[in-house]
């Protein structure tokens, strides 16, 4: 059995639908949730000085034979922000810059910043539904007897907040294979989406039906917000402009951010 979600105010709880595109009312409600993950950070035991951080980043660039200009371009960051930091014209890089560079290099951002890695511990997370990757499908919650738990590493700041969905379909198969499990947290338990994040998205139809999907959140050079599939299938190549949804959709809402994924294998 499944429970269909048809009343957005009765089932989403912390969402807000004032316009075509919403990020779960994050900005409007942040003042009421200042103790939650949006402002909480794991601080390193010893804060690195700017010179120490420069040395760490220089050593990483040198040891991996990276060219700053091409690395920055591939990561979607301003190369001058890196040059200015390394040359001592600025004292820090924005955490988002570290995150984008790390995503391109396929390493955790602490390897570039010098911060101590955040400790993840095995946590049992309930898989309570299915999400159609890249394509909107009616959002459902499984009955309790259909749900099951997976033991996955979850960063300490998300303990008790992490949720899980099983992926269906092949429209995000470059990142999430069908049958894999995505671990995600609500916006209010974390932060607004950033360029490159994978996000859980709800579309709200005019009849109040809610459909869910999994996409990559991208921001273009003019500030436009897009939801991209990541698939090798020719049917799943077109992005969705969040501010210009199809006629049958009243509004689009990013409800959460994927923090990890898990794929069970036969042992």
Image (cartoon, rainbow, N blue to C red):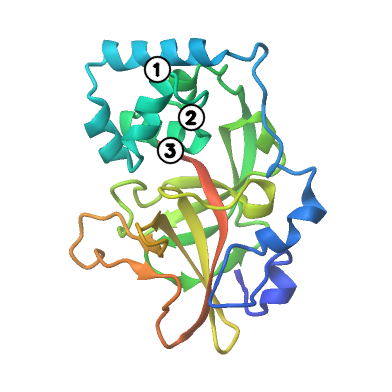
Report, in whole angstroms, how far the alpha carbon at label 1 lies from the one at label 3. Answer: 35 Å
Report, in whole angstroms, how far the alpha carbon at label 1 lies from the one at label 2. Answer: 10 Å
Instruction: Check residue 93 in the rendering and tell me which mark sits there, or answer none.
Output: 2
Pointer 1 and pointer 2: residues touching (CB < 8 Å)? yes
Front residue (pair 23, 141): 23
Q: Residue furthest front?
A: 89
Determine which quarter of the picture holds residue 134: bottom left
Front residue (pair 59, 116): 59
In the shown orientation, is residue 54 left or right of residue 78?
A: right
The mark that comes first in sequence, 1 or 2, is: 1
Residue 267 seen in render: no
User: At 35% across and 57% down in the image, what residue appears?
Assistant: 221
User: At 22% across and 24% down in the image, what residue appears?
Assistant: 67
Q: Residue furthest left?
A: 234
Q: Is residue 172 above or below residue 208?
A: above
**Quadrant occupied by the C terminus:** top left
Residue occupied by mark 1: 57
Residue 51 seen in render: yes
In the shown orientation, is residue 34 left or right of residue 166?
A: right
């Amino acid at each position: 059995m499944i429970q269909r979600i048809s009343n957005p105010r009765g089932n989403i709880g912390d969402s807000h639908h004032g316009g075509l595109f919403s990020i779960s009312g994050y900005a409007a409600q942040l003042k009421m949730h200042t103790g939650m993950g949006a402002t909480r950070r794991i601080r390193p035991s010893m804060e690195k000085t700017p010179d120490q951080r420069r040395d760490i980043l220089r050593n990483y660039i040198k040891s991996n034979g990276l060219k700053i200009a091409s690395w920055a371009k591939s990561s979607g960051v301003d190369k001058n922000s890196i040059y200015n930091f390394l040359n001592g014209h600025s004292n820090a890089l924005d955490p988002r810059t570290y995150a984008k560079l790390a995503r391109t290099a396929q390493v955790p951002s602490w390897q570039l910043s010098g911060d101590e890695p955040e400790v993840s511990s095995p946590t049992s997370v309930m898989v309570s539904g299915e999400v159609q990757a890249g394509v909107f499908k009616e959002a459902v919650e499984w009955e309790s007897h259909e749900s099951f738990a997976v033991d996955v590493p979850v960063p300490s700041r998300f303990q008790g907040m992490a949720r899980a969905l099983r992926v269906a379909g092949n429209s995000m198969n470059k990142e999430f294979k069908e049958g894999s499990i995505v671990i995600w947290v609500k916006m209010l338990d974390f932060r607004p989406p950033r360029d490159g994040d994978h996000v859980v998205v709800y579309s709200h139809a005019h009849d109040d039906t809610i459909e869910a999907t999994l996409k990559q959140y991208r921001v273009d050079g003019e500030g436009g917000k897009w939801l991209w599939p990541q698939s090798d299938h020719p049917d799943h190549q077109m992005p969705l402009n969040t501010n210009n949804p199809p006629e049958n959709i009243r509004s689009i809402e990013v409800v959460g951010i994927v923090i990890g994924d898990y794929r069970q294998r036969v042992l």
